[in-house]
Amino acid sequence: MITNQNPKGGTELQLEFLTKYVKKELLDQVQICTSIPGKVPIDPNKLNILWQKNSYDQSNLHSWFADPKNHNKYDWYIFNSHWNYEKFRYIFNIPTGKSLVIKNGTSNFPKRRVYKEGDPIKILHHNTPWRGLNILLAAMQSIKNPNVTLDVYSSSQVYGDAFSNKNEKDFEPLYDQARQLPNVNYIGYKPNEYILEHMTDYDLYVYPSNFEETFCASALEALAAGVHVITNNFGALYETCAEWPVYINYDTNYEQMAKDTAVAIDVASQYLHKSYVQEHLEEQQRFYKRFYSWEKKGAEWTSFLKGALYEKNK
C-alpha cells in the first residue's frame, strides 16, 4: 500500500512550483499563507499574502472572512480564478484594491498521444472520490463499447495519511462498486508525479463534477497534455477549461448527469480518431503551454511581487 505522509493536493503542488519558478531572494521577503487564514503567522517585516484557493463556503473560512476587521490583516489576497475572487468579493466584500487573480500553472506538456481508429479508448479519472466518482461509475454502467475502459486513481490519500485514515473508509463502498464493473479498473492512490508521467497513456479525462471547483488543477494537467476532456460547467471549470472540452450541463439530478456523461463518452468514441479532433487537441496543448506554463506563471508572480514590495517599502 502506498502511503502519503507528505500530502500534496493541488495547493501544495502549486506552492512547490512557486518556489521553483520565483527567485528565493524575492520569496524571502514574502509570507504566503495558503487558503486558511492564520495557518501561517503574519510577519510584520514581510509582505503578507493570503493565496486563496479554497471555496467561499468552507466552514473553516467563513467566520474569518465574515468579520470585516480581518480583511486588513493581509497586504494582498491572491485568487486562483476570477470565479473564486468574485464569490469572495460578493459574499464577504473583500477589498478589491488588494485582490488579484493569478491562475494555477502546470509544467505538464509531454509529447501528445495521437489516437488512431480502432485503438482501445482509455479514460482517466484521478479526482477525489467525493467529486463525482459516483456519477462517473453510473455512466460507465451504460457504456457497452468493449473498447472503452476507465482507470480510477481516486483516493483521499492525496491529502495525507492522517486525513485518509479518518475518511477513506467512507468511500470503500464506492471503490467496491468500481472494482465490480467490468470496464473499470480501480487503481487507487498514486502520487501526482506518477499521474503526470502516465497522462499520455489516456485518450479521455472525464470529470462529471458535483463539487464547486475553484480552479481544478487535474483538468489543467489533462488539457496541457493534449488529452480530450469531458466535464461540466460547475464552479470555475468553464473558466479553467474554456472552449476546449466537451461540456455536459451540471444537474442536481445526478442520474441525468450520469446519462449525459455516458452519451458524451459514446459520442467521443466515434469521433476521437478524426483529423479535426486531433488538430483541436494539438491546438489545445499549444494554448495551455502558452498561457499556463509555470514559466509564464512564475513571471506573473515575479512581476506582481516586485511591484507589491516596492509599494510596501517606499
Image (tube, grey):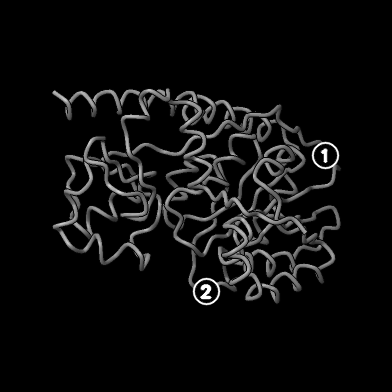
Q: Nearer the viewer, mark 2 or mark 1?
A: 2
Residue drawn at x 20%, y 23% as measured from the top left: 310
Which residue carries the number 2 mark? 253
Q: Amino acid at mark 2?
A: Asn
Query: SS class of the residue under badge 2?
Result: loop
Q: Residue at x 36, y 46 (%)?
A: 33
In the image, 282 versus 173, the foreground residue is 173
Q: Position of residue 180 (x, y in %)?
A: 82, 71
Placement of 273 over or under 87, stated as above or below: above
At x 18% / y 62%, what residue is drawn? Answer: 67
Rendered image quadrant of residue 140? bottom right
**What residue type is disc 1 on?**
Glu
Residue closer to the observer: 199 or 206:
199
Cα separation, mark 2 vs mark 1, equals 34 Å
Residue at point 53% right, 42% down? 13
Residue 224 on image: x %, y %: 59, 34
Residue 117 tag number: 1
Give the side of residue 134 with respect to residue 236, left or right: right
Quarter occupied by residue 265: bottom right
